[in-house]
Amino acid sequence: MRLPRVLRGGPFAVGSVAVLLVLAAMMAVPSAFTRRDPNAIDFLARLKPPSLAHPFGTDENGRDLWARVVYGARPTLAAAVLLIAIAAAIGSIAELLIGTTDQRTNE
């Protein structure tokens, strides 16, 4: 059995697929990648730089930016996929209407 072509593309293709798989897992199970609540406020940890405790640092309210990125990935991707689906549906309907009418409208 042969590997799919994308996996035979070299180290960059394999690395890209690995990153995409990690991002998909991050969106499916965000709690596996961070134990912090993305909305928990800790004023004592305001504007901390990146560290082991806070990989992306903290914001002005002391919220962990890594947790906010991980938990924010799901609604962002859901909106993107929804918009792509809407655009594909509108484009398909438009093409069906144009294809069933006179060929002059297709030019």
Image (spheres, rainbow, N blue to C red):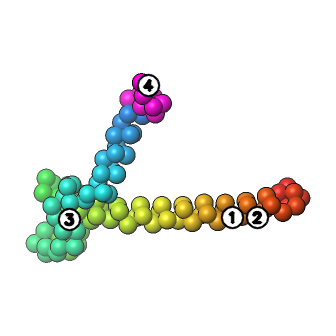
Q: Secondary structure at mark 3?
A: loop
Specify whether residue 6 is painted magenta.
yes
User: Pointer 1 and pointer 4: residues touching (CB < 8 Å)?
Assistant: no
Number of the label disc, if any, that sits on residue 12: none
Q: Please name the residue shown 13% across and 73% down the image.
A: 42
* Quadrant assignment, res 59: bottom left
Relative image position of residue 89 (x, y in whole percent): 61, 63
Residue type, mark 4 in image: Arg
User: Could you tell me how far apart the alpha carbons at marks 1 and 3 are, in whole angstroms?
Assistant: 44 Å
Location of mark 2 (residue): 97
Query: Which residue occupies the extreme left position in the image?
Result: 44
Relative image position of residue 14 (x, y in whole percent): 38, 33
Q: Secondary structure at mark 1?
A: helix
Location of mark 4 (residue): 2
Question: Which tag, 2 or 4, sits closer to the chain's start?
Answer: 4
* Quadrant assignment, res 46: bottom left
Location of mark 1 (residue): 93
